[in-house]
Image (spheres, helix red, strand yellow):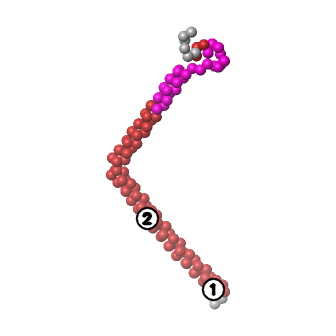
Amino acid sequence: MSYAEEIERAAEECRRRSSLLLDELEQINRRTADTSRELADQSAAEMREFWSTHAAELERARAEAEEKERLETEAREQREAIARSIAARKANRDVLPIDQEDEEAAFYQRETWLI
């Protein structure tokens, strides 16, 4: 047998094995795609079942969360209103003279009006 025939035989064997591997890889890819499709369909069905089974619970939880948020917002607004009211009362109650050396201010700040 010559070297050319040996090389040709080796090349043919390589092509044959390569073809077998490509066929096997194609089958694996097909099975993987089929399994992936089945799992996607199954998970979608399970998700629909979960949502239909727990819809009332989820809606109740959402409503409770919205109510809690509304109450927290109202409480915060009340606290802010009370703080503004206190600040306004303090501002109107405590009047200080601009200049401590002001004689006219000292006249109005005296503790007794009895002369």
The amino acid on which the numbered mark 1 sits, given as a three-letter code, is Glu
The amino acid on which the numbered mark 2 sits, given as a three-letter code, is Thr
Query: Residue 114 location, x and y as percent?
Result: 54, 10
Q: Secondary structure beneath disc 1?
A: helix
> Left or right: 57 with respect to 13?
left
* Front-most of residues 85 and 25: 85
**Where, by quadrant of the figure, is residue 11 drawn?**
bottom right
* Front-most of residues 104 and 43: 104
Query: Residue 42 location, x and y as percent?
Result: 39, 59
Residue hosting label 2: 35
User: Dot 2: within a 10 Å radius of its alpha carbon, few (fewer than 14), some, or many (20 or more) residues?
Assistant: few
Residue hosting label 1: 6
Q: Is residue 62 magenta?
A: no
Residue in the image at 35% along x and 54% along y: 49
Magenta span of residues: 79-106
Whether residue 60 is situated above or below residue 101 in the rendered picture: below
The prevailing secondary structure element of the residues shown in magenta is helix
* Front-most of residues 1 and 22: 22
